[in-house]
Amino acid sequence: MADIKSIDQLDAAGKRVIVRVDFNVPCKEGVVTDDTRIRAALPTIKALLAQNAKVILMSHLGRPAGTGFEEAYSLKPAADHLAKLIDAPVQFASDTVGEDAQAKAAALEDGTVLVLENLRFDKREKKNDPAFSQELANLAEAYVNDAFGTAHRAHASTAGVAALLPAYAGYLMLKEVGTLTGMLEQPKRPFVAILGGSKVSDKIKVIDALMDKCDTLIIGGGMCFTFLLAQGYAVGTSLKEEDWVERAAAMMEKAQAKGVKLLLPTDVVVADAFADDARKETVAADAIPADMMGLDIGPETAAAYAAAIAEARTVFWNGPMGVFEMPSYEAGTKAVAEAVAANAEADTIIGGGDSVAAVNKFNLADKMTFISTGGGASMELVQGEALPGVEALR
């Protein structure tokens, strides 16, 4: 990140500074239900306010159609919530680059905040449309990107505006990129990587990249069944990707060749339906009944995974071990989360997505060294891909 200007190099006094934040937060009946991402942006927002900047915040929320206002995806609840967290006036613009946004941005006073309406109400945002980028840039005199969670997207607010204004990285962006690249380049050893989630096809590049860096690779979640197929086991009605069995086998061979311990389930919790109240039992990984599906790792596997995690000095975790949203199949993910939390000697990095939801569900967030706000962005960074939102700042 040495070739990227940080927010500390920005003389923001009296300037209108437009900041790309990640306020893509869950809301229910107009109230924010998890403010993790809003709080993550506070250091950057407060630093700008301390300089008496005029702070303009832009973000997306959800997946609107891109054809105009949709109440369910309005950023008004996020703006209202932000107002409770900072000691500064917070205004809200009812549009993104229209008359209200332009008027409020022009009249903005030093040391105050303006939140623009959802960027994705305008379809030009995702297209990185030059005209839309220019309209956003016209609102301000400097640009800060503090939205690591969208850094893997080349959109108007992440790439386009950066080319039109003096561009800087916010504190969250610097911390996310610095932590993840540091983990990959100079991990404390043993380095244990834990990958879960549903599909091998979604994680194959990450598996490949981590195998070049880690000492132990733990596999759980739905994707483990494709690996079990590669071992020659039958997996019943479990989620599987037949087309990826060969690749999974190749990954197992690579692990052996590189001396990386690849840990796969030895027992699984199976059920006769994808339901919390289904009939379930614990079986050996090579004895899954033909009419049942695996929905969690078993207790023997959870204990083995926990033992490997206890020896680690760097832990990277992305993806649950099972369908942890259902109480019947949360035990494996909970055991892994508790093992990571219990290892006080390790640098423990949670790589965004469902792993963050799991850590929060089990009230273990404060026991982790670092929790990434960007699942997709963290995965692309780990697998060695350039992030457009970061590259645009260079």
Image (cartoon, helix red, strand yellow):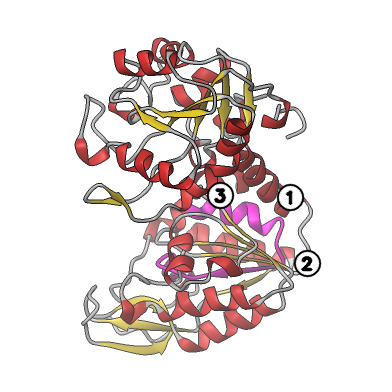
Which residue is denoted by mark 2 in the rendering?
A: 189
**Residue 127 lies in quadrant:** top left
Q: Is residue 319 above or below residue 337?
A: above
Label 3 sits on residue: 205
Disc 2 marks a residue whose amino acid type is Arg
Image coordinates of residue 103 in percent, x first then y, are 36, 13
**Does residue 67 lie above or below 42 as drawn?**
above
- Mark 2 crowdedness (10 Å alpha carbons): few <14, some 14-19, many ≥20: some
Among the 4 quarters of the image, the one containing residue 192: bottom right
Indicate whether 160 appears above or below 190. Answer: above
Who comes first in sequence, dot 2 or dot 3? Answer: 2
Find the distance from the CA under tag 1 to the CA under tag 3.
Answer: 19 Å
* Element on which disc 1 rests: helix
Question: Which mark identifies residue 182?
Answer: 1
Asked if the stretch drawn in magenta spans residue 207, the answer is yes
In the image, the segment drawn in magenta is 203-227
Judge depth for marks 1 and 2 and give the one in front: 1
Would residue 55 be visible to someone looking at this image? Answer: yes
Could you tell whether 360 is left or right of 294 in the image? right
Amino acid at pointer 1? Gly
Q: Residue at x 31, y 37 (%)?
A: 76
Task: Please name whichever residue, 76 or 154, is drawn nearer the observer in this view of the structure.
Answer: 76
Q: Gap between marks 1 and 2, in whole Å?
A: 13 Å
Q: Given this view, does label 2 or label 3 mark the residue nearer the observer?
A: 2
Locate the C terminus and report the quarter of the image it occupies.
top right
Which kind of residue does numbered mark 3 sit on? Lys
Secondary element type, mark 2: loop
Is 255 placed left or right of 250 in the picture?
A: right
